[in-house]
Amino acid sequence: MTEHSNESAVRELAAYLQDRSQKIDKIFLFSSQDTKKQLPGTDMTTVHFFASRIKEIVTAENIIIVDYNENNSIDSSLSDIGNMGTIILSEAQKIQREQGAAGNITIHADMTGGMRNASMMMLGVMRLLNFSGLQMGKILYSNFSFNRKINFVEDSQDVYRFFDLVAGATEFAKYGSVEKLADYYNIDIYEQKPYTAECGLSRELYELVNAMGYFAQSIKLCRYGELQDACALLAAKMQAFTNPERKNYDANDKLFEALLPTIKESYKTILSAHDDLDIIAWCVKQGYLQQAMTLYTERVPEFIAKQGFYSLDVETAKEINKKVKKDEISAANYLLCIWGKDVDKREDIRVYFKQKLKKPLNLLKQWKTVDDADVEQELEKLQQDIDKHDFFITFDKDDFKKALSEIRQIIAGKIAYQDIIANNDGLSGLLKRFLTMDEEEGAWRYFDLTQQIPDQQELRKLFTKLLNGTKEEQLYKLFNIDKLPYKQLSRGYLLQCGMKEGKLTSNLRDDAALVDIINSYTVIRMARNSSNHARHEKGASPRKIEEKILSGIRELRKHAAYLKSKQEVNA
């Protein structure tokens, strides 16, 4: 009988391990239908023949077979890959349980021969096991030819590791992470050691990977000064690596050169001339949302000041400069995040409204006897006070009058309570606002009164509670007073107060444009603070925050372009 088997790779591996006082513990193999057929003139199958040839290396009970149907499609082979991976991991876990911490499992592979898609299946199993934490060892291939007297077994591990190189380049291009590349080239990116020829790489490639590592560390820690330096260093090292006058290209350089265009495309925004907004937008694109929020919070005030979005009067500028000398904060950040206590009138407003809102509430309490003229007079006084004090708020007196009118009509039997509960104004709006005091802003618009106040009897009970138990802070929402300063974003409100007193001047089209910019900035700053301090409350989704940042950048660009065009006209 003249037969051959894949034993050469097994014997090569056994000899290699024996020199290191190790051995092959188990063999896992794919077995197709053909390998189960009886060999001519024997009582053995191909699998049995293979096992008999290596029995002095691995006993038959330690050869674990995974059946494979060679007639299946390549896609169907995925289940075979999963099956093989599961079996190997199960055996590995048994060894680790038996050996404890000493259970360091290394997987070796023989890629020789097999069915038409054998290499792809073996590669799939290896990547699966590698991902699961098993260490990859030798990847062998029996290079056999009938025309040669001497044949040999090759270790093709470098070819397999090329996939790690591609994965590392992909990881850096998409996420700014360099760990896989550093592992591939055996470079300690955290030490940033100077180049030596012993590393086995060209100086240009070594320094480029180190520059990528420095950039990755800088973006993770979000240190603005380092990040700017890292961008400049990365651009310089990429240029040095791709210098056409270089003559020391080796295989590593050629492989990485093929991957570099995709990396450069991903980083083109920050490798060329850029500003802070470019870096922030790039962070959003790459999924660095925390870094994007931090950079937006710290750098947008500087952008706004540098572009001349506002001007300060002399005294206010002096006041701020004096403050920032004591604190480690820029003047621009101080203005947007701290300044404004001396112009803050919110406490005065709260005290004022505590008294003024009692009168309309008494109108509700006296609904049986109150005169329409009295209602009109009290509401008109409230409206005039709001307008006179310029509190940046709005009050819908007609909505309040409608609520009072509907109360009377329901009690008099002129309209049914069920007729009005679907509305978002009048009595229905008032009741919804009252019942959803602790809910999110605007939640009352979707509130179903039929679940809480199904009939007129329940209405009477709730109305008594409303008239006697309403707290001061609930009055504002109850009377549908919108944009009250303490509900409004405080920074925008304080800047409005500052502009009103002449301490601050908007250089944009109008004051509202600057307030909108500051309010948008404040929303992102609050989201950053909530995240950084691990607060318990729920916030906007990552997608919403990304949209807010990008829309904020677009608005900043638009206003900066407006100011630039205005300067060009004046010039």
Image (cartoon, rainbow, N blue to C red):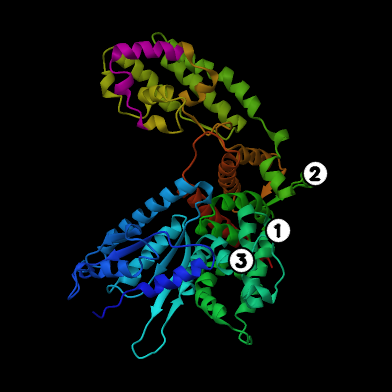
Q: Earlier in the sequence, mark 1 or mark 3?
A: 3
Q: Residues within 10 Å of mark 2 (few under 14, many from 20)?
A: few
Question: Where's residue 300, x and y in %?
Answer: 63, 53
The quadrant of the image that shows the N terminus is bottom left
Q: Which residue is mark 3?
A: 212
- Please give the residue where the numbered disc 1 appears in the rendered image: 225
Look at discs 1 and 3 and give the one toward the viewer: 3
Label drawn at residue 314 = none
Mark 2: which amino acid?
Glu
Magenta stretch containing residue 453, yes or no?
Answer: yes
What amino acid is labelled 1 in the image?
A: Gly
- Which residue does the numbered mark 2 point to in the structure image? 315
- Quadrant housing the C terminus: bottom right
Check contact, mark 1 vs mark 2: CB within 8 A: no
Question: Is most of the magenta stretch helix, strand or loop?
Answer: helix
User: What kind of residue is marked 3?
Assistant: Met
* Local crowd size for mark 1, using a 10 Å CA cut-off: few (<14), some (14–19), many (≥20): few
Look at the picture and state if 482 lies above or below 116: above
Residue 164: percent from the left, percent from the top? Answer: 49, 67
Residue at the spot x=69%, y=47% of the render? 333
Residue 239 image-quadrant placement: bottom right
Q: Position of residue 313 (x, y in %)?
A: 76, 47
Q: Sort mark 3 into few (<14), some (14-19) or many (20+) by Cα contacts within 10 Å.
A: many
Q: Earlier in the sequence, mark 3 or mark 2?
A: 3
Q: Nearer the viewer, mark 3 or mark 2?
A: 3
Residue at the bottom extreme of this rendering:
147
Q: Which residues are magenta?
A: 446-467
Rendering quarter of residue 569? bottom right
